[in-house]
């Protein structure tokens, strides 16, 4: 083996220690710092991708929300087309004639509609047309008429309903089968509340 002088051996040891220190310094100073920066960059990239995914979902939801808004607007327009509009009295007569069609119900009187508050919700954007209807019908005929009216016009409301037996004087005193049948009829009175189409 080669024998080195003390001075060369010390220089060699010093150089080895310096090289090891330099490698350790490079490891902790450059490589480890770069690894930390790489991990930090990866974390930032994942957060940015997550934000991008959320933004894409929001954009797709915005399109769905816009489509839902258009559908709701069309439905509202359809509903508003059935609302009271123009001169309310002829509208009420036409409405009751449509509702009465196919039913054995006789409408005797329709009061002239008046405007008023609906009273359902605060700041409700619609006014209401309220009118009273009087008529006669057999009990089961009136029940079918009322059920059909409420099903065909779900945005109208029948309230303050009263049913009374038809007065005997109206039935007649001749005792005929027709007069006996008329005694079984009921007289009804109800208030109808219908929403008024805006801008009328």
Image (cartoon, helix red, strand yellow):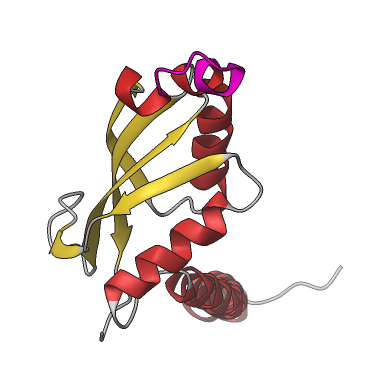
- Residue 200 in picture, x, y percent from top left: 26, 85
- Residue 140 in picture, x, y percent from top left: 57, 23
Looking at the picture, tell me which residue is in the foreground, 198 or 171. 171
- Residue 98 in picture, x, y percent from top left: 55, 60
Quick one: which residue is furthest to the right in this view? 1
Q: What residue appears at the point 58 percent right and 33 percent down from the top-left corner?
A: 144
Q: What residue appears at the point 38 percent right and 52 percent down from the top-left corner?
A: 156
- Residue 52 in picture, x, y percent from top left: 57, 79
Left or right relative to 90: residue 44 = right
Q: Which residues are magenta?
A: 172-180
Residue 127 vertical position relative to residue 120 in the rendered view, above or below: below
In the rendered image, residue 177 lying in the magenta stretch gets the answer yes
Residue 196 vertical position relative to residue 103 in the rendered view, above or below: below
In the rendered image, residue 152 lying in the magenta stretch gets the answer no
Looking at the picture, tell me which residue is in the foreground, 146 or 172. 172
Quadrant of the snapshot with the N terminus: bottom right
Looking at the picture, tell me which residue is in the foreground, 122 or 112. 112
* The image quarter in which residue 24 lies: bottom right
Left or right relative to 170: residue 114 = left
Residue 151 vertical position relative to residue 34 in the rendered view, above or below: above
Q: What residue appears at the point 15 percent right and 50 percent down from the top-left corner?
A: 119
- Residue 20 shows in this picture: no
Give the number of callouts. Answer: 0
Left or right relative to 120: residue 74 = right
Residue 140 vertical position relative to residue 134 in the rendered view, above or below: above
- Residue 102 shows in this picture: yes
Looking at the picture, tell me which residue is in the foreground, 92 or 82. 92
Quick one: which residue is furthest to the bottom in this view? 199
* The image quarter in which residue 111 lies: bottom left
Q: What residue appears at the point 41 percent right and 24 percent down from the top-left corner?
A: 171
């Amino acid at each position: 083996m080669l024998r080195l002088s003390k001075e060369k051996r010390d220089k060699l040891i010093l150089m080895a220690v310096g090289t090891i220190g330099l490698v350790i310094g490079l490891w902790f100073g450059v490589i480890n710092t770069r690894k930390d920066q790489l991990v930090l960059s990866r974390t930032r990239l994942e957060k940015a991708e997550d934000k991008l995914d959320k933004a894409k979902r929001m954009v797709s939801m915005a399109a769905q929300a816009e489509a839902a808004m258009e559908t709701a607007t069309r439905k509202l327009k359809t509903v508003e087309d059935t609302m009271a509009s123009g001169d309310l009295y002829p509208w009420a007569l036409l409405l009751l004639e449509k509702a009465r069609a196919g039913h054995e119900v006789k409408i005797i009187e329709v009061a002239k509609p008046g405007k008023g508050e609906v009273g359902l919700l605060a700041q409700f954007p619609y006014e209401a047309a309220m009118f009273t209807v009087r008529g006669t019908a057999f009990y089961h005929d009136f029940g079918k008429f009322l059920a059909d009216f409420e099903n065909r016009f779900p945005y109208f409301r029948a309230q303050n309903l009263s049913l009374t037996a038809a007065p005997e004087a109206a039935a007649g005193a001749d005792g005929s089968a027709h007069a006996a049948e008329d005694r079984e009829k009921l007289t009804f009175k109800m208030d109808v509340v219908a929403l008024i189409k805006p801008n009328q």
